[in-house]
Image (cartoon, grey):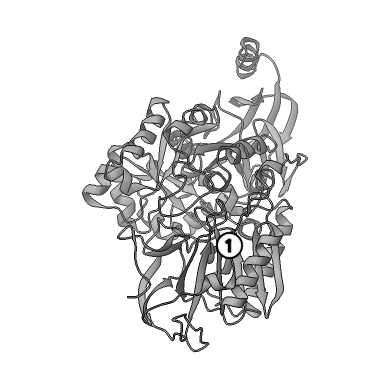
Amino acid sequence: MTKEGLKKLIQTAGGNIPAETVIKNCKVFNVFTGQFNEGDIAICGGEIAGIGSYHGETEVDAGGRYAVPGFIDSHIHIESSYLSPEELGRLLVPHGGTTIIADPHEIVNVCGVKGLDYMMKAAENTALDIQYMLPSCVPATPFEHAGAEINAPEMKEPIQREKILGLGEFMNFPGVVNTDDGVLDKLMTAKEAGKLIDGHSPGLSGMALNAYAAARIQGDHECSTVEDMQARLALGMYVLLRQGSACHDLRTLVKGVTPENSRRCLLCSDDRQPRTILSEGHLDNHLRICVEEGLDAVTALRMATLNAAECFRLYDRGAIAPGYRADIVLLDDLTQFHVDRVWVCGVLTAEQGKYLPPVEKCDISDVMSSVHIRDFSEERLKMHLKSGHVHVIEIQPGGVVTKKSTADVPLDADGDFVWSKDTDIAKVAVVERHQWTGNVACALLKGYGIQQGAIALSIAHDSHNVITVGVNDSEMAFAVKCLEEQGGGIVLVRDGRLVDAMPMPIAGLMSDQPGEWVAEKLESLHENAYTQLGVHRSVEPVMTLCFMSLAVIPELKLTDMGLFDVTQFSFIPMEA
């Protein structure tokens, strides 16, 4: 702000000159006192000048609606929406979202720093204020091949950038607890830059959790029980209550929110697909759930605004008060949280569900052509097992955690798994797509339900190699070939023909199409997965599969290097 800008703001606040914009006749939510006060909101230079009785060059009648601060999503992966940053902004702002804390972990694992550069440039084209965390684990573990490797030396430049708030979720919690030298270098890079460190520690407890918190890990979004949540709150960490398209922890965790701990609780999405946004909303949906579960609206709104702003040191927002950013949401009610209008930095940006600014997208050429597969054929999918008594990755309902199970499966004369419609076990494979290694690893997946054909994705958290599941090697190999030819995304095949597909030219992770198109295409892909391929309707076919290689979420996962036991943090043989 310039000296003249400050002078004008003060004069406006004092009622000496008209405000640029005044929102009149509203119930203003005071996050500091927990009260709603009737009055006008005066806006000057993108900031709030004052609340009271004001006149302005432009005056807007709020019609008695509730005025609350813009919502802040405290942790989200843009790539998991399958949309570009510009498109995601277009969808989120009409639901009251004015700021998101985004971790571009997915695209940086594929494209390295040039992926971060693309995301930051694209963020300039949306009214949504996208604040980034620098991905901390590229690759997420040393047990897979990613498209880049970013260690402390490579972090020194980007961590200093203005829109980089700190290090993103530190998934290598064993490295922190065991004081791995490279991990300590990364932590020190953030500390020396005066930046935050975000957390990710599923299942961590006791002294190990103490060790993790001692590194001043700011918060954690991986709590699945109230006990997990209480343990982290007791150590001074923030807890991010998650409600995404894949993980639904909010209804469970909100029961643990109390008057004593609520100021350390935030709301986040983590992963949220466009069809979820279009049908359910964004943080407005989180707020509805909070109130449905018995939390009062005042506490819920603080979790979506002030708490998140304070946690991430965004001290210019999170409240409707003099000198704060004019990020303002008009709500019709405090139960359904229906959003009427949204101002971002003092500019009316959404009205009755419509995003008002034009959408311009930046060039994607630097992050295209990201599928590089070497020496792959149907033969590479054969397993050559010595025994039919095997470890199996068992899908668990409602999340991305899997169970380490065993089963007895039929084998052919060469020791390869033979699929049978009488069992709910299918072959799954991960094919390396970044460094031309030629790596192919296979395992068995229980609970997916596939009865015909195969599915292949270039979205496979966190290194995003190609993952495929199918009823036989021929179908799986054909799916991988189709995916390679279209440059990444999602393909469904059956009987040697393409059933459905969605190209994702942005790093093999994101579409360049509008959110509504992506939502419709995902709906089509899901329905075809159910009806044409026989995937269980209780399983989200795309999101579930893309998490089967996430080697930081228990218990058993598959990377391009083999079957990985997350609880032991080591590879295990297929034979049990």
Number of on-image labels = 1
Q: Can residue 36 be seen in this view?
A: no
Residue at the location (51% across, 50% down)? 146
Relative to 57, residue 66 above or below: below
Quadrant holding the N terminus: top right
Q: Which of 487 and 37 is in front in this view?
A: 487
Residue kind at label 1, given as amino acid type: Asp
Q: On the rendered structure, is 190 left or right of 227?
A: right
Mark 1, secondary structure of its residue = loop
Residue 105: % across, % down: 52, 46
Q: Nearer the viewer, residue 114 or 481?
A: 481
Q: On the rendered structure, is 567 left or right of 159?
A: left
Residue at the location (66% across, 61% down)? 484
Quadrant holding the C terminus: bottom left
Residue at the location (64% across, 69% down)? 479
Q: On the rendered structure, is 430 left or right of 263?
A: right
Relative to 26, residue 398 above or below: below
Relative to 428, residue 63 above or below: above
Residue 432: % across, % down: 53, 58
Residue 541: % across, % down: 57, 69
Q: Can residue 144 be seen in this view?
A: yes
Q: In which quarter of the image is residue 527?
A: bottom right
Residue 214: % across, % down: 27, 38
Name, please, the residue furthest toward the left: 207
Q: Which of 33 and 544 is in front in this view?
A: 544
Q: In which quarter of the image is residue 202?
A: bottom left
Q: Which of 220 and 505 is in front in this view?
A: 505
Residue, disc 1: 375
